[in-house]
Image (cartoon, rainbow, N blue to C red):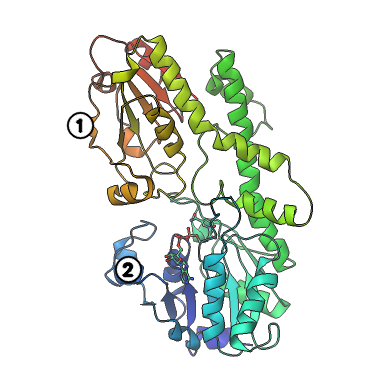
Amino acid sequence: MISYQELAAKERPLAVIGLGYVGLPLAVALSEHFEVIGFDISAERIAELSAGRDRTREVTAEELARAWVRYTADPAELKKAGLIIVAVPTPIDHHRNPDLTPVVGSSRTVGQNISAGTIVCYESTVYPGLTEDVCGPIIEKHSGLACGRDFFLGYSPERINPGDRQHTLSTIVKVVAGQTEAVRDLLAKVYGLVVTAGIHLAGSIRVAEAAKVIENTQRDLNIALMNELAVIFDRMNIDTQEVLAAAGTKWNFLPFRPGLVGGHCIGVDPYYLTWKAEELGYMPQVILAGRRINDSMGKFIAEKCIKLLVKNDCHMARSRVGVLGLTFKENVPDLRNTRVIDIVRELAEYCPEVLIHDPLADPEEARREYGLTLSPLEALRDLDALVLAVPHAAYAALTPAELTGWFRPGAAPVVLDVKGILDPAAMTRAGCIFWRL
Ligand SMILES: NC(=O)c1ccc[n+]([C@@H]2O[C@H](COP(=O)([O-])OP(=O)(O)OC[C@H]3O[C@@H](n4cnc5c(N)ncnc54)[C@H](O)[C@@H]3O)[C@@H](O)[C@H]2O)c1
């Protein structure tokens, strides 16, 4: 097996496969200590990074310029690597089953290019068992090498939170597991150089895989409970945020908030666990119930908007609704699996004009992925309703007076605030019909 000294002395490089939100910051951080090859299947991504630009905004232009990462789309480069870290996406398909195409594809690439003695460490979020039961055999098949003898597996889940500058690679405890103790210890040493928060040694790869997938499942379920409460309290005309502020004064009441659950982690990872559970003959009930509730929130918010418009005597056939924010969460440009689309699609069933603005989303991607044309902020005028869907920092400075100026004269402005960032009293004083989740 490769030794730590070989990596540290730069006799053998380390490779990161998949240079996205997870892989790129990792490659950049590790390049301070090791010779790093950054491999991605996307030639476009390689060209962009070679030109010093990261569209995910996880790494600044200065950090990219400083980092010594050799970006390549040539898999043959992997032959030199003594440690290969895989950080490819783990999405779900249209049936909400795990789509293993990237994990399987990257494992095949590793198998075709791996040298003896190499450690392959997966960072992608998977169900327990995938690394050893699926990835290892693929590498064996394509390399002719034996797993556990000629090459070795490791697993270390990524726990970053996109757009969060506080919880980063270096400040989150890293869970590390290996096929053998020696593999785990080597990985712990490597990661220990870039993670100042510390390393947690997991007893097995399966434990580390399970730990990662339940972190997001727990979060998904807690948000689902808040969403269900919000739906119930809405029927009671009780403001959920006020209830949560009051309940939150108890020391052990957890500070979760209702909201849309999108993106490619929290709304996706639980399906990896439930898929595996079903394969083993157990039908998860609580986890899938939470998923259903969270997936229904966009429709709920849109229906609420329509009810408020109708109550406000709005002529629906000529209604104009503005939506602020399209990305899956605030302050990131990531449009993947955004649940704002559920609000937009439901609204579009009733309102002929739904205008969407997002200061961070790529207009071309919005068109390609969702068939939506983004509008400039100035186009959100003569509105009947406004849905503040994603509280990007750029929207924080909007005042009630400014917002009410965007509405059609004559009727009271209908404003829906999904994340509860506006001041309800100020909005009501400004003459709005105001609702928040
Ligand atoms: N983004 C996050 O905040 C986050 C947090 C924790 C864990 N994760 C997990 O980390 C993994 C990676 O997520 P991400 O957000 O970085 O994904 P991403 O989509 O941002 O990036 C993945 C990169 O992998 C490349 N890729 C795809 N298939 C490939 C292949 N066969 N060979 C080489 N490269 C390939 C893509 O071109 C892309 O550049 C996923 O399993 C995800 O669940 C993500």
Residue 205 location in percent, x, y? Answer: 70, 68
Residue 195: name its quadrant.
Answer: bottom right
The one of 186 and 237 positioned closer to us in this rendering:
237
Residue 56 lies, with reference to residue 317, above or below; the image says: below
Q: Residues within 10 Å of mark 2 (few under 14, many from 20)?
A: few
Whether the residue under disc 2 has CB within 8 Å of ligand 1: no
Residue 384 location in percent, x, y? Answer: 31, 19
The local secondary structure at tag 2 comes to helix
Residue drawn 38% across the image and 40% down it: 326
Say whether disc 1 or disc 2 marks the residue closer to the N-terminus. Answer: 2
Residue 324 location in percent, x, y? Answer: 34, 33
Q: Is residue 2 visible?
A: no
Residue drawn 62% across the image and 72% down it: 188
Viewed as shown, does residue 411 lie left or right of 226?
A: left
The amino acid on which the numbered mark 2 sits, given as a three-letter code, is Glu
Q: Residues within 10 Å of mark 1 (few under 14, many from 20)?
A: few
The one of 48 and 372 positioned closer to us in this rendering:
372
Residue 329 location in percent, x, y? Answer: 44, 42
The one of 209 and 97 positioned closer to us in this rendering:
97
Residue 27 lies, with reference to residue 390, above or below; the image says: below
Quadrant of the image containing the N terminus = bottom right
Q: Are the two marked residues, 1 and 2, in contact with CB atoms closer than 8 angstroms?
A: no
- List the residue tagged with mark 2: 44
The amino acid on which the numbered mark 1 sits, given as a three-letter code, is Glu
Residue 383 lies, with reference to residue 49, above or below; the image says: above
Residue drawn 58% across the image and 30% down it: 227
- List the residue tagged with mark 1: 378
